[in-house]
Amino acid sequence: MIYTQKMKNITIICALLLTICSNESYGVQIDKTDVLNRVDVCDTRNITGTCVEYTLSELDDWYQEFVQRACPRNKRGQLVGIYNKDARCPSVNRVARCEGIIEDPAERYEYDKHYYVGTADNYSWQPGSVQVTCSKVSGHFVPE
């Protein structure tokens, strides 16, 4: 159990570091009129039992490009994160959410992360562990 929790924490830290440390711009063109109210997701339920929602109207151009290109870099073996435009994280098997996670307070890079049970090997989130994780990233815990 301690090993599983450590692996979850390492995965979360690695995902955050991947997001923070990359300075690459990939040149993806996004039309502002298409994203005013659009929510996109990076679905990593099969990898870490999580799914991340981005409200694109709250992200500047650089972050919009970045989140789309960074999603498939979430990998475990042959499994990769799947980026879905104009979608929401599913509610099936969701145990909790962490809303309003702020990646960089200066830029207001904010997103919501959803946690699931039974969607990834060795990742079966429980509300209590999500609440602890959420408090560490200054998010708002929402149980299902």
Image: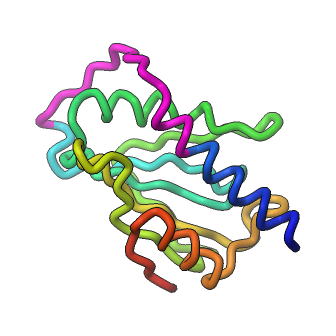
The one nearer the camera, 65 or 103, is: 103
Location of residue 82 with respect to 134 vertically, above or below: above
Residue at 69%, 73% (x, y): give it.
125
Q: Specify whether residue 25 is painted magenta.
A: yes
Q: How is the image coloured?
A: rainbow
Rendered location of residue 142, percent (x, y): 44, 81
Residue at 40%, 61% (x, y): give it.
112
Residue at 50%, 85% (x, y): give it.
143
Location of residue 8 with respect to 69 vertically, above or below: below
Rendered location of residue 53, percent (x, y): 41, 55
Q: Farthest residue in the left direction? A: 33
Residue at 40%, 67% (x, y): give it.
138
Q: Specify whether residue 137 is painted magenta.
A: no
Q: Which residues are magenta?
A: 16-33
Rendered location of residue 33, percent (x, y): 11, 36
* Total numbered labels placed on residues in the image: 0
Query: Is 129 left, or right, of 23 in this rendering?
Result: right
Quarter of image, res 78: top right
Q: Quadrant of the N terminus?
A: bottom right
Query: Is 21 left, or right, of 130 in this rendering?
Result: left
Query: Is 69 left, or right, of 37 in this rendering?
Result: right
Location of residue 130 with respect to 109 vertically, above or below: below
Query: Is 59 left, or right, of 2 in this rendering?
Result: left
Rendered location of residue 26, percent (x, y): 40, 15
Location of residue 17 with respect to 28 vertically, above or below: below
The one nearer the camera, 51 or 13, is: 13
